[in-house]
Image (tube, grey):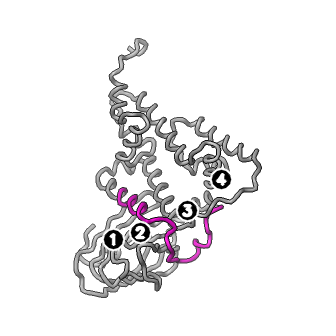
Amino acid sequence: MICADFDEFEEALYGVAGHYVLRSRQQRDWRLRVVELDGVALMFGREGAGTVYSGIGLPGFFNIFLPLSRHECTVLGGQRLDRRLIGWMVPEAMFHIDASQPASWMTVAMSCELVLRWAQQHEDEFDASILSRNLVCLAQQDLAPLIWLALRLLRIDHCAPQELHAPAAECAARSELMDRVFRSLLPATPAQRGQATLHSHQQILRRALELLDAMPDTPLHMADLCQTCNTSERTLRNLFTRHLGMSPHRYLMQHRLHAIRRAILRAAPGETITEICTRFGVWDFGRFAGLYRRYFGELPSQSLRGRRSLPTPLSQA
């Protein structure tokens, strides 16, 4: 979206309501790109002048704010930003952003329902105090991976929206983006030894693996495992790493890879790789194809061609 002036730009902002006051003469047009992921909205803005924005978070949304340029010229909540700082805005709380020069930025607006669900799944590492106040805080991890992921989503939304917004793919993209946001916000504290007994830990691990075995062709996520096992992601992470030598995220990724390969090898006539992959929550096809080849020694398209080159069994002829 390209806006000739700030009024149209102001009205299009997602997750917040407020107004601009120009600090300098307009130097360029105003540009806005929004990627909506059903409850999460990624927004890239390029302002056309130095501004002061006074706003309030809408009742249904939490927001993060990252400047992408002119960091040293941007002040949020009275604090001058740099490349390591991140802004966090809660619903119905006022904030002020002062940018003395035309700046570019990104925000992620997340519905309260999704944020509270994420907090519940990570209750033993989530600082609940951030739910009640605006913050400017030092990022706990390098922000480059978050920005890279956001730009990747923006590019795919532009080039292949039908792939990104297939229901399972959109859910996976939203989950990945929220995980990256909160890993940037929350301290990466060492895991504390839980009070649960070895027997209860074994039960948790068994329930997680039973769910995966019972649903071999279903796209599953960490939230599904946490809900089934009635435990936090940290507990699952510790158990998978201790007993299986890998994180549950990696285990789920391998589970999905094998499920997709099975679906490819059983593909119906005319069924495409895109149709199969989006059904399993794949939204970044370039990254997925590289991962598939690393594990199986060929691209998904090669697996499909190989499957279709096999002679038809007599029982199906």
Say which of marks 3 and 1 sits in front. 1
For disc 3, the marked residue is 113
For disc 2, the marked residue is 107
First in sequence: mark 3 vs mark 1: 1
Check if mark 2's residue and mark 3's residue have beta carbons within 8 Å.
no
29, above or below 38, in the image: below
First in sequence: mark 4 vs mark 1: 1
For disc 1, the marked residue is 45
> Residue 157: where, in percent of width, then height?
33, 55
Residues 141 and 123: in front is 141
Residues 183 and 84: in front is 84
| Left or right side of 13 for 85 | right
Q: Amino acid at mark 1?
A: Gly
10 Å crowding of disc 4: few (<14), some (14-19), many (20+): many
206, above or below 39, in the image: above
Q: Residue at x 40, y 29 (%)?
A: 267
Q: Which residues are magenta?
A: 124-152
For disc 4, the marked residue is 235
10 Å crowding of disc 1: few (<14), some (14-19), many (20+): many
